[in-house]
Amino acid sequence: MGQPAKTIGRVPADHFDNGFYGQDILSVSQFDRDKLDYIFNVAHEMRVLVERFGSADLLQGKILANLFYEPSTRTSSSFMAAMMRLGGQVIPMNNVQYSSVTKGESLPDTVRTLESYADIIVLRHPEMGAAATAAHYAAKPVINAGDGVGEHPTQALLDQFTILEELGRVDDLKVTMVGDLKYGRTVHSLTKLLVNYDVEFVFVSPDILRMPKDVLDVVRETGHQFTVTDDVHDVVTESDVLYVTRVQKERFTDLVEYQRVRDHYIIDEALMATAKEKMIVMHPLPRVNEISYAVDEDPRAAYFRQMRNGMYIRMALLAAVLGKA
Ligand code: NCD
């Protein structure tokens, strides 16, 4: 991954060479196809492990600090569950309003504090680049669990793992992303990850929520076909993956603007009737109004399976960064 390995306990960080040991996980750009294969294979093993035995003791004695400056249900609890299922323990800092952050403590000082108790820090923060800042100050590994409108690399990994598990391949697919492509960090990371494969992209959003230029540049530079449109009906019939996102209310400065676009796309049974028989609907969740509840019964609705995959991917990452996997 290019960066010097960090310290884990008293073991020299380069001791176990799986490419991840002692590394920060900050961006999907750290992953190539070999590294992705490795993580997906381990995630698959983690699924088997959980289904057969429930837990293991691979990370016994290790402690994770779960530091969340933004709301979270899935990312936060799946990191905690992942650590606990591998025999490790967690310092849950999901309510920073009750911590010294409220007294004005800076991110570097908070990170320095937590790393003196824990072996790894998982960080979610409203500012883009916050995870990189934390990693700069921390001697222990930092995992980015979402930095504002920037990236959400562990979500992209679980998204891609879901595509692989559901459709059996990642190459030769048409992936349509719908909704808030401007502020949605999951679609930024997923797009940058999928350019490692032979994927054709369709980006569906209202004009004011288009995919940012820097992400489109990556798609262009890697020679991938893509279409930008605001009509989901035109493109759903051809899609292998329909990745739906929530309009990110908390990122709008003008709430009137939010009200105008919030219900722009609603995936319902009528739309699903026009889609391929073998395709999947994904959503990082939480869902607000974008997918009607009737679609949940459709076997192509993969979002709850996708959410479960998050724990297996995070188990694989924790094992790779901290353990001897
Ligand atoms: C996403 C996030 O936080 O970016 N949620 C998640 O991690 N599953 C998506 C969202 O909040 O809309």
Image: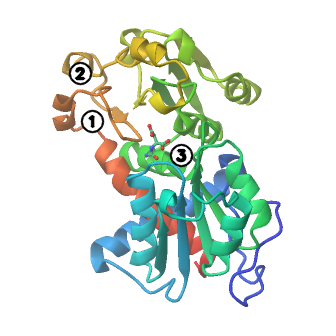
Q: Position of residue 200 (x, y in %)?
A: 56, 25
Gap between marks 3 and 1, in whole Å? 19 Å
Q: Residue at x 29, y 22 (%)?
A: 267
Q: Quadrant of residue 298?
A: top left
Q: Residue at x 63, y 73 (%)?
A: 114
Q: Earlier in the sequence, mark 3 or mark 1?
A: 3
| Residue 31 in sight here | no
> Toward the viewer: 193 or 128?
128
Q: Position of residue 130 (x, y in %)?
A: 69, 50
Q: Is residue 98 above or below residue 212?
A: below
Instruction: Look at the numbered disc 2 and give the secondary structure of its residue.
Output: loop
Contact flag, marks 3 and 2 (Cβ < 8 Å): no
Dividing the image into 4 quarters, which one contains the N terminus?
A: bottom right
Instruction: Look at the numbered disc 1 and give the secondary structure of its residue.
Output: loop
Q: Which residue is mark 2?
A: 268
Q: Which residue is mark 3?
A: 156
**Amino acid at pointer 3:** Ala
Q: Which residue is mark 1?
A: 300
**Amino acid at pointer 1:** Arg
Q: Earlier in the sequence, mark 3 or mark 2?
A: 3
Residue depth check, mark 1 versus mark 2: number of the one nearer the observer = 2
